[in-house]
Image: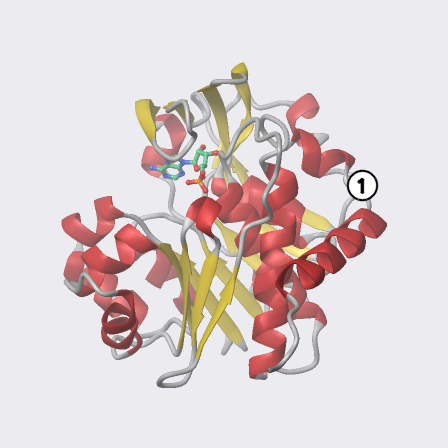
Amino acid sequence: MSILVVGSVAYDTVETPAGRAERVLGGSASFFAVAASFFSPVNLVGVVGRDFGEPQLAAFRGRPIDLAGLERMEGQTFHWQGRYSQDLNSRDTICTDLNVFEFFEPKIPAAYGRSELVFLGNIDPVLQRRVLEQVERPRVVACDTMNFWIKGKPQELRETLAKVHVLLINDQEAKELSGEWNLVRAARAIRAMGPRTLVVKKGEHGVLLFGEEGDCFAAPALPLETVIDPTGAGDTFAGGFMGYLASAPGLSDATLRQAVVMGSTLASFCVEAFSLDRLLTLERPEIDARYAVFEKLTRFESL
Ligand code: AMP
């Protein structure tokens, strides 16, 4: 079952307490696609400039990632620069050079129109909706967004959310989107906007999954001794989550819980190196072994 992802493909310049990485591969669609490709074929829709060449594309080669939807435009590739705090819990955006991304109009190749799972990366909600108009009745539509769109295009975002099954956002965004400071109340308000499933990411504090009314599942993040760069952890989580769903038979509560743990597993590898470096050396047995570590981390006996 193939997954369609629409989002940014970027050059990132990142500073963390562990060091600095200059103009390395980044972007929401890049992290997502590589993570999801461990489980399922991925169709990638995005845009790059003329400065994005074969060495960068090599990250996607040799994996079931179709690049027919990766448009190449005159100009420079999107460039994002960020600097993390000492504890890695916050970051400042130093610059966002949209470059060709400013003119991005997602064109979904006809062959992708039947994708059964769709992940709408963090882009303008109007563009997210146009993507959905080009896809025939997908089984699962998941979506990311950010404060910029929550504040800047609230109505457009509401229209997109009405067509989304799973929303993946961080706790701060959930509070802003709902206007509620309590996450349980926030989840109820957001689920009433459309998404039946809400995944709230809380960085090093893990993830909360809200399903049917009152049903909540919590997964921790793996306590890691060395974290090099958290960039892309959210998109990598989404890739592991959606990839697992694509490879599973249904969408039961148990499957959603497994998908959350698989997303957390992939994210735990992402932060171990700059850019996609760790994801690119990752092998399936390592994923399965770390999933088992998560199982052990959260297992406890009944009273
Ligand atoms: P995350 O750490 O999950 O928030 O994702 C970081 C990735 O998002 C980086 O690789 C950036 O290239 C990309 N990114 C940052 N700002 C934007 C933006 N405004 N639109 C699209 N992608 C972005």
Relative to 63, is 120 on the left or the right?
left
Color style of the picture: secondary structure
Relative to 244, is 47 on the left or the right?
left
Q: Quadrant of the N terminus?
A: bottom right
Farthest residue toward the right? 285
Residue at the image position 44 percent from the left and 51 percent from the top: 121
Residue at the image position 63 percent from the left and 32 percent from the top: 272
Relative to 98, is 62 on the left or the right?
right
Q: Nearer the viewer, residue 146 or 295?
A: 295
Q: How many marks?
A: 1
On the question of residue 109 being in view, the answer is no
Q: Nearer the viewer, residue 70 or 19?
A: 19
Residue at the image position 28 percent from the left and 59 percent from the top: 174
Residue 145 x %, y %: 33, 53
Image quarter for ligand 1:
top left
Quadrant in the picture for residue 115: bottom right
Residue 92 x %, y %: 31, 26
The residue that label 1 is drawn on is 62
